[in-house]
Image (cartoon, rainbow, N blue to C red):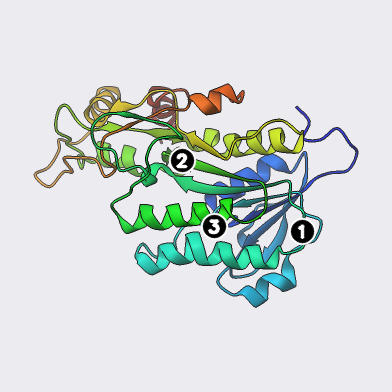
Amino acid sequence: MAITESNKQPRILIAGCGKLGGSIASLLTEQAEVFGLRRNPDRIPAGIHPLGADLMQADQLKDVLPDRLDAVVYCLTPSSYDEQGYQDAYVNGLNNLLCALSGQTLQRLIFISSTSVYAQDDDSWVDESSPTKPSRFSGQTILTGEKVALESGFPSTIVRFSGIYGPSRRRFLDAVVAGNMDPVSPGPFSNRIHEVDAAQVVVHLINRSLNGETVEDCYIASDCEPVRLDEVVHWVQAQLPCSAPGADARKGGRAGSKRCSNQRLLDAGYRFRYQDFRAGYREMITERP
């Protein structure tokens, strides 16, 4: 689907053009004029207009932001994993960007969020209408950022990603191979999404928005099979040689135990390339050196 029916290319800003943001930006370059913003613009992928600025420095943003933007993707990760790092990434940086965007008429602001805003730990299904009462400061701060985006005055969409994995995010797979994972059985439910699908989900929603199709204010972005952690570990162990788990191997998950429903995203027409963990990890295992 073309991103627009007119000859004018949309102008899209990726604020936080790192690993995920860079992938989103690269996918959009054939359909739009794409601007990537990060502190070190030399690390922005080719084909994207590089913008160098620190989102914590409001005065820098006013000097570099392009005008006539059609869409903005806000895609930051904390520079430090403490309360200040989360506050800067999900709230302060967004507030600074919104101030710099004053006067523009965006068709869509997309805020990259996380399923960590859900605290459910009872194996229940969660969807976009489920209660969000995170117990940790990280989820609480991300939820504050969501509120800032939704109250920005721009048409806004929150995308809550579950755990992103893929060829550039191998930590879990490497931990299983190294014997650093030994979850209890039955383990907690875990949820994940391949990095290819993560980027394509955002592009899909931008396409819908700029083509005048309905876009909701929130989507869970997770693959089609929530699965218990021990099942994933045992499956990986059956696919390739793995070290025996050591005494200090991790026993549990880090995100409670819930099952994330992607039905709203499926209803919006998105089709997953990697529908479950087997499809994604099988390919990664096959491509291991």
Label 3 secondary element: helix
The extreme bottom residue here reads 59
Identity of the residue drawn at 72% across and 30% down: 213
Quarter of the image for residue 61 reads bottom right
Instruction: Point out residue 19 in the picture as x, y percentages from the top left corner.
Output: 53, 50
Between residues 179 and 114, which one lies in front from this camera angle? 114
Identity of the residue drawn at 69% across and 64% down: 51
Marks 1 and 3, Cα distance to the nearest angstrom?
17 Å
Residue ID for mark 2:
161
Marks 2 and 1, Cα distance to the nearest angstrom?
27 Å
Could you tell me the amino acid type at mark 3?
Val
Residue ID for mark 1:
104
* For discs 3 and 2, the disc positioned in front in the rendered view: 3
Identity of the residue drawn at 37% across and 55% down: 140
Could you tell me the amino acid type at mark 2?
Phe
Residue ID for mark 3:
148
Could you tell me the amino acid type at mark 1?
Gln
- Quadrant of the image for the C terminus? top left
Instruction: Point out residue 228 in the picture as x, y percentages from the top left corner.
Output: 26, 27
Count up the numbered dots.
3
Image vertical order of residue 176 relative to residue 152, above or below: above
Between residues 76 and 22, which one lies in front from this camera angle? 76
Marks 3 and 2, Cα distance to the nearest angstrom?
18 Å
Indicate which disc, 1 or 3, sits on the residue closer to the N terminus.
Answer: 1
Q: Is residue 64 left or right of residue 5?
A: left
Q: Does the rendering let one see residue 244?
A: yes
- Quadrant of the image for the N terminus? top right
User: Would you call the spot at circle 2 few (<14 residues within 10 Å), some (14-19), or many (20 or more)?
Assistant: many
Between residues 102 and 75, which one lies in front from this camera angle? 102
Q: Is residue 123 left or right of residue 15?
A: left
Indicate which disc, 3 or 2, sits on the residue closer to the N terminus.
Answer: 3
Label 2 secondary element: strand
